[in-house]
Amino acid sequence: MDADVTDSAGPPADPDHPAGETPQGRSQEDPGATPDAGPDATGPTEEEPGAGTKEEPEPKAGSDAEPESETEAGTGPEPQPAPGPKAEPAAPSSGESTGVQTWADQPKDGSASRRKRPWLRWAALGASFLVLVSAGAGWWLYNKLDGNITTDTSAAAELKVYEKERPAQVVMDAQNILLIGSDSRAGDNSKYGRDDGGSQRSDTTILLHLAADRKSATAVSLPRDLMVEIPACRTGDDKETRERFGQFNSAFELGGTACTIRTVERLTGIRIDHHMVVDFNGFKDMVDAVDGVEICLKEPIDDKDAHLELPAGRQTLNGEEALGYVRARKTLGDGSDTERMERQQRFLGALVNKMQSNGVLLNPTRLYPVLDAATKSLTTDPGLDSLRDLYDLVRSMRDVPTDQVQFLTVPRQPYRNNPNRDELVEPDAGELFKQLREDKPVAVVPADELKDAEKGTGTETGTGGDGKPDGAASESPTPTPTYSGSSAADDLCEQ
């Protein structure tokens, strides 16, 4: 072997000859051809002591053994063929490589990696599917609840006509909502009484005051038999009634919700911000949605008019039983509407307590049936006719302590000209309305406790008196007026 051939192992090939071609007459011992031939083409040489050994030499990829022999002898008339691009993947396929990963191995490794991780793609697809399904279901539920609510646009239009005579709002962040329980016997309510051509009166009317700081809520029942001044109102057939002095619940029959709101505003001087009308079925469904409400009866009830038969003691009422309980009048107590209102207040307090204590207001799964039941039989003004509006209202009330959710009846007494009707007790009623109008606190205590306090102070003013239990007047120069009532925290079995 020439010295100049051996010394030329490092430099690149002659530019006159393309890479990978061996000129005629140059032996395979020329190191310049070795990189193109691949590690297993000829086996190790003396110049490459670190190369692995092979058990049997293999012919070069893409060439025959005979040309290889001729080249080695230096007698072949043709140059050694170049391995070409396809020769490189064939070299490691023999299984005798040194274990070093080459570029040719990468596609094979990548395919294996993809085969090992198919669950990642399926997990991503599954998660995307669940997100889409959840979003679609949520949107469907929202629209369903939102569509349940009926908007009372006629009341809003009439109230706008009489805007100048309505009282101004004194405290901006406080809310006054008029809750009206309709006693219509039309449709599904026909089993509760005779349907007089679809006419209806307000069976229950409650003025709900939410304090501006949302730390208290006061619900004041207005007796349906209360004698009040009813303004001139527009009827359903676009006629106008004359101003009159009459029974409170006739305002709803004559002029609907707008007439009732204007009557309450004239009576109390309080601006009504919103209103809700709920019928019998809505009340029943709400009770069923919270799995019933617990009460305690001192005596058994058997009232065929109210479709109610219950034993004495502690028990949980379903929706149908609850409706009979709050509507019963003739067979419970003295049969007065005042006592019935007190029973309604205690039951509503127990309902609020059940919703808060069981986490209904904080649990979307449990809140949905309640909202569904409430919205299906709910008619509201445009300011509360969406699920978002109702949710914001409920959310603002959910942190009110149950002992600060108070229920009372406006101070009243038998009407002097007709003992079957009611009239306000003054100045107690006026003081109550002033406190609510100015968003100032009021307090409630059980009726027997208030009577004991009145005896101690020597006052005898029916349900209101001076509004303070015994000894309270000396505690503060501006005592909080106190009335007969209850709170949501009261246990009905301790009454």
Image: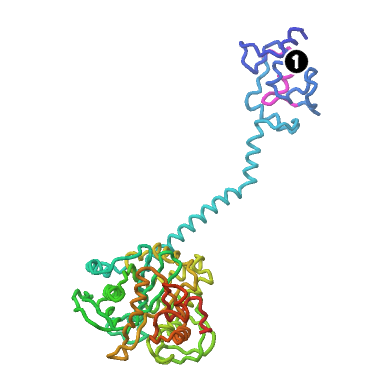
- For the N terminus, the image quarter is top right
Instruction: Estimate the x, y position of residue 431 in percent, counting from the top left.
Output: 35, 76
Instruction: Estimate the x, y position of residue 196 in percent, counting from the top left.
Output: 28, 85
Q: Which element carries disc 1, helix, strand or loop?
A: loop
Considering only vertical position in the picture, is 451 above or below 2?
A: below
Identify the residue under disc 1.
29
Q: Quadrant of residue 394?
A: bottom left
How is the rendered protein coloured? rainbow
366 sits to left or right of 414 = right
108 sits to left or right of 47 = left
Instruction: Estimate the x, y position of residue 94 in percent, counting from the top left.
Output: 73, 32
User: Residue sitting at 63 percent across and 39 percent down?
Assistant: 110
Label 1 packing within 10 angstroms: few (<14), some (14-19), many (20+): some
Foreground pick, 110 / 244: 244
Foreground pick, 234 / 18: 234
Instruction: Estimate the x, y position of residue 450 in percent, counting from the top left.
Output: 45, 83
Total number of numbered labels?
Answer: 1
User: Would you say residue 77 sits in the magenta stretch?
Assistant: yes
Foreground pick, 311 / 409: 409
Foreground pick, 196 / 114: 196
Three-letter amino acid code of the residue under disc 1 = Glu
Q: Is residue 188 visible?
A: no
Considering only vertical position in the picture, is 78 above or below 198?
A: above
Considering only vertical position in the picture, is 341 above or below 13?
A: below
User: Would you say residue 205 sits in the magenta stretch?
Assistant: no
Q: Which residues are magenta?
A: 58-78
Considering only vertical position in the picture, is 310 above or below 251?
A: below
Q: Is residue 147 visible?
A: yes
